[in-house]
Image: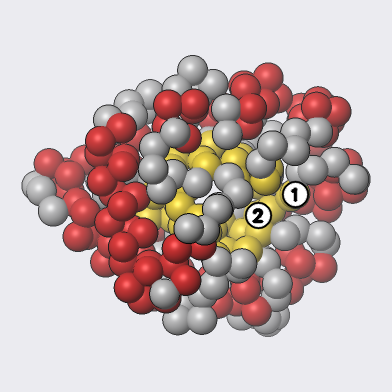
Amino acid sequence: MTTRRKLVAGNWKMNGLTASAAELGQMCDANPSNCDVLICPPYPLIGRFVGAAGNAHIEIGAQDCHTAESGAHTGDVSAALLADVGATAVIVGHSERRADHGESSALVRAKAEAATAHGLTAIICVGETLEQREAGGAGELVVGQMLDSVPDGATAANTVIAYEPVWAIGTGKVPTSEQIGAMHAALRAALVEKFGEGDGMRILYGGSVKPTNAAEIFAIADVDGGLIGGASLKANDFLGIVSAA
Ligand code: PGA
């Protein structure tokens, strides 16, 4: 059986200013080493945070990247530049990007390819809306979304899956342990079928993870850590979640 080291990743979304380096500083002072830890701040903070993290066991990542190497894409950022400034991972296909920017799974897959081509870990997000869950068949839908979004060349070393039910993001609503377990088992089975080594690929859960529910969620089979939004902005909350991993 493969042992997968847990990963707790913070997605700061469009939050934080230069002064937020103080929160990162507190996280680095604690220097957690029980699991892998990643913070994904907005683009302009990445270089500064890479410097601030120094030798602490905290990696810095981004929240999106473009598919192209460089070129006329105003406002976009390439995976090449992210790697160049010291990022080690990038979130792709977050539901907010899929909804706000109409990103398709095909585009997400191309972004993941660009990321891994530059040595970044691609954290590929999938998840159903409330309407989709209530209509039934969320498992099949999310597995399909994942298979459409993950590049053929994905490996356990360069790819992480994040299951984030859209209705649980920022709402305080969390699926039952049975619901999370069933979805992660379905995603795991699909990964093993497609990649063989899917056994080693990490599958994170995301959506209203807090210090108070993290231990229970991380104990579910096939949950290999979490993608944390709101609770990653404050060092105390985030470190509480990290220590539960
Ligand atoms: P949340 O967000 O923890 O604030 O629910 C999670 C996410 O969107 O990654």
Image coordinates for residue 153, horizontal then vertical, percent: 51, 81
Secondary structure beneath disc 1? strand
Secondary structure beneath disc 2? strand
- Mark 1 residue crowding within 10 angstroms, few (<14) / some (14–19) / many (20+): many
Q: Residue at x 41, y 75 (%)?
A: 196
Name the residue carrying label 1.
59
Front residue of 29/191: it is: 191
- 240 w.r.t. 39: above or below: above
Name the residue carrying label 2.
62
Image coordinates for residue 133, horizontal then vertical, percent: 17, 44
Q: Is residue 132 left or right of residue 148?
A: left
Contact between marks 1 and 2 (CB within 8 A): the answer is no
Res. 228 in view: yes
- Mark 2 residue crowding within 10 angstroms, few (<14) / some (14–19) / many (20+): many
Task: State the image quarter where residue 34 is shown.
Answer: top right
- 15 w.r.t. 146: above or below: above
Q: Is residue 81 left or right of residue 90?
A: right
Q: Residue at x 80, y 27 (%)?
A: 30
**Identity of the amino acid at label 2?**
Ala
From the image, state whether disc 1 or disc 2 is nearer to you: 1
Q: Is residue 223 left or right of residue 174?
A: right
CA–CA distance in space, label 1 to label 2 = 10 Å
